[in-house]
C-alpha cells in the first residue's frame, strides 16, 4: 500500500503554517514556513528555484488567500539550495527583503569570478584524494546543482538573539552551526516549539561535513550546537525535512552516540596506515553509491577526522599536497 500524499499546507500553531515543497532528490521535500504578522506574512525558507517548487509555494499562498505581495520578510535559515534557492526570485515577486545570517549571506553572494569558485572546490577535492576523473564528474554535478539556486545579496541581516514577532507569538533566533557555518533555528518559547531547520531531522542525521567553503571543525561546532539546543525546553521539534517530532533529549543523545561511534570506526580505519579522506569514506560508506553521496560521505569523513585530530586521536600529514590521516 502506498502512503497517502502528505498535505501541501499544514497548520503548526496559531498564525504559523508549514508548506511542503518538492525536491527532485532522494530527499523528496523541504518544509518552508509562513508566519502571520500584523502587516503581512513572514516566509521562512524558500525551496529550490524550480518551477515545481515555486508552483507549490504559490498554491499554498492561494489556499491561504494570499499572493506574493502578502510577504513582508523572507528569512533564510542557511545557504543550501533547498532553503535559499528561490529567495532572490521570491524577493523580485514580493518586494520583501531577504534576512540571512551575515556569514551565510557572504557564502551565497554572487561569486567573483565564477571560475575561481570551481578552482577552489577542485583544489579541495584533490587535496583529500579524489581521483582526477572523479573530480570532473563531481564538478559536473556541482554545476547542475548550482543551477537550482540563484545567487543573491541578502539585504536584511539577522543573527542569534534576534526576535521575530508574529501573530501567534515570538520566535527567538539561535545559531546552530555544524550542518552549515552559521545555520539558524527559531524557538517559540511560549509554545515550546523549535523550528530546527536542518540542525535536527527526525530520521536522518543531518550531514556534518568539511567542504571547500566550510573548513575548521564542523563536528565540534555541531556538538556545541546540540548542547545549546538540549538546554531548551522543547515539546515539539518542527524540522525542515519530514514531520514534527518530540523527545529532543533522546534524539540529541542518540545523535551524539552516532557521531561518537563513527569517530571510533573512522579512527580504526586509519590505524594500520595513513589514508586520505576519499579512501576512508569508501571504507566506511562503500564506493558504489552515486557520486553526490560519495562527495558528502567524504565531507563527513573529513569532519570526523578533523574532530579526531583536534582531540589528539589522529595525526594529519601533508604528502605532496595531499592530506593523509593516521591514528596516533
Ligand atoms: Zn541544509
Image (tube, rainbow, N blue to C red):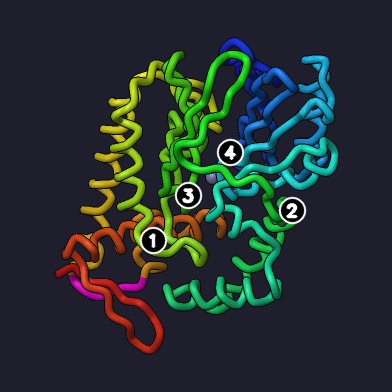
Quarter of the picture containing the N terminus is top right
Instruction: Name the quadrant of the C terminus.
Output: bottom left
Which element is circle 3 on? loop
| Relative image position of residue 322 (x, y in whole percent) | 39, 81
Q: Residue 73's image quarter?
A: top right
Name the one closer to the observer, 275 or 51. 51
The answer to whether residue 5 is seen in the rendering is: no
Task: Estimate how packed mark 3 is, as few (under 14), some (14 to 19) or many (20 or more) residues with alpha carbons within 10 Å.
Answer: many
Q: Name the residue carrying label 2.
A: 150
Q: Nearer the viewer, mark 3 or mark 4?
A: 3
User: Is the residue marked by circle 2 packed among few (<14), some (14-19), or many (20+) residues within 10 Å?
Assistant: some
Among the two numbered marks 4 and 1 on one chain, the one whose residue lies closer to the N terminus:
4
Predominant SS along the magenta part: loop
The residues tagged by marks 3 and 1 sit, at their Cα atoms, a distance apart of 25 Å
Q: Is residue 3 above or below residue 90?
A: above
Q: Is residue 87 visible?
A: yes
Q: Position of residue 299 (x, y in %)?
A: 44, 60
- Quadrant field for ligand 1: top right
Separation of marks 2 and 1 at Cα, in angstroms: 30 Å
* Residue receiving disc 4: 27
In this picture, which residue range is highlighted in magenta? 272-276
Residue denoted by label 1 = 281
Q: Picture quarter containing residue 96?
A: top right
Instruction: Assign a secondary structure to mark 2.
Output: loop
| Above or below: residue 134 compared with residue 166 | below
Residue drawn 44% across the image and 29% down it: 202
Q: CA distance from mark 2 to mark 4?
A: 20 Å
Numbered badge on residue 182: 3
Amino acid at each position: 500500500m502506498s502512503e497517502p500524499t502528505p498535505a501541501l499546507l499544514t497548520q503548526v500553531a496559531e498564525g504559523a503554517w508549514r508548506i511542503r515543497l518538492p525536491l527532485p532528490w532522494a530527499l523528496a521535500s523541504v518544509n518552508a514556513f509562513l508566519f502571520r504578522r500584523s502587516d503581512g506574512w513572514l516566509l521562512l525558507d524558500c525551496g529550490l528555484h524550480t518551477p515545481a517548487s515555486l508552483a507549490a509555494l504559490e498554491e499554498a499562498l492561494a489556499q491561504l488567500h494570499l499572493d506574493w505581495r502578502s510577504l513582508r520578510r523572507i528569512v533564510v535559515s542557511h545557504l543550501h539550495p533547498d532553503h535559499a534557492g528561490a529567495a532572490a526570485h521570491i524577493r523580485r515577486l514580493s518586494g520583501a527583503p531577504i534576512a540571512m545570517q551575515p556569514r551565510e549571506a557572504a557564502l551565497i553572494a554572487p561569486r567573483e569570478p565564477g571560475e575561481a569558485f570551481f578552482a577552489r572546490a577542485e583544489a579541495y577535492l584533490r587535496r583529500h584524494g579524489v581521483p582526477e576523473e572523479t573530480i570532473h564528474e563531481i564538478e559536473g554535478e556541482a554545476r547542475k546543482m548550482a543551477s537550482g539556486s540563484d545567487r543573491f545579496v541578502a539585504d536584511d541581516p539577522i543573527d542569534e538573539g534576534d526576535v521575530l514577532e508574529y501573530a501567534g507569538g515570538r520566535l527567538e533566533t539561535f545559531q546552530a552551526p555544524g550542518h552549515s557555518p552559521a545555520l539558524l533555528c527559531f524557538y517559540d518559547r511560549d509554545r515550546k516549539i523549535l523550528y530546527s531547520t536542518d540542525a535536527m531531522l527526525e530520521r536522518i542525521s543531518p550531514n556534518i561535513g568539511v567542504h571547500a567553503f566550510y573548513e575548521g571543525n564542523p563536528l565540534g561546532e555541531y556538538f556545541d550546537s546540540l548542547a545549546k539546543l538540549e538546554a531548551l525546553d522543547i515539546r515539539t521539534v518542527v524540522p525542515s525535512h519530514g514531520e514534527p517530532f518530540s523527545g529532543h533529549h533522546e534524539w540529541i543523545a542518540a545523535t551524539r552516540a552516532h557521531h561518537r561511534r563513527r569517530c571510533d570506526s573512522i579512527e580504526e580505519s586509519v590505524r594500520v596506515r595513513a589514508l586520505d579522506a576519499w579512501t576512508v569514506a569508501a571504507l566506511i560508506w562503500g564506493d558504489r553509491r552515486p557520486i553526490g553521496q560519495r562527495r558528502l560521505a567524504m565531507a563527513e569523513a573529513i569532519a570526523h577526522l578533523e574532530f579526531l585530530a583536534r582531540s589528539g586521536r589522529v595525526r594529519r600529514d601533508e604528502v605532496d599536497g595531499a592530506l593523509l590521516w593516521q591514528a596516533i
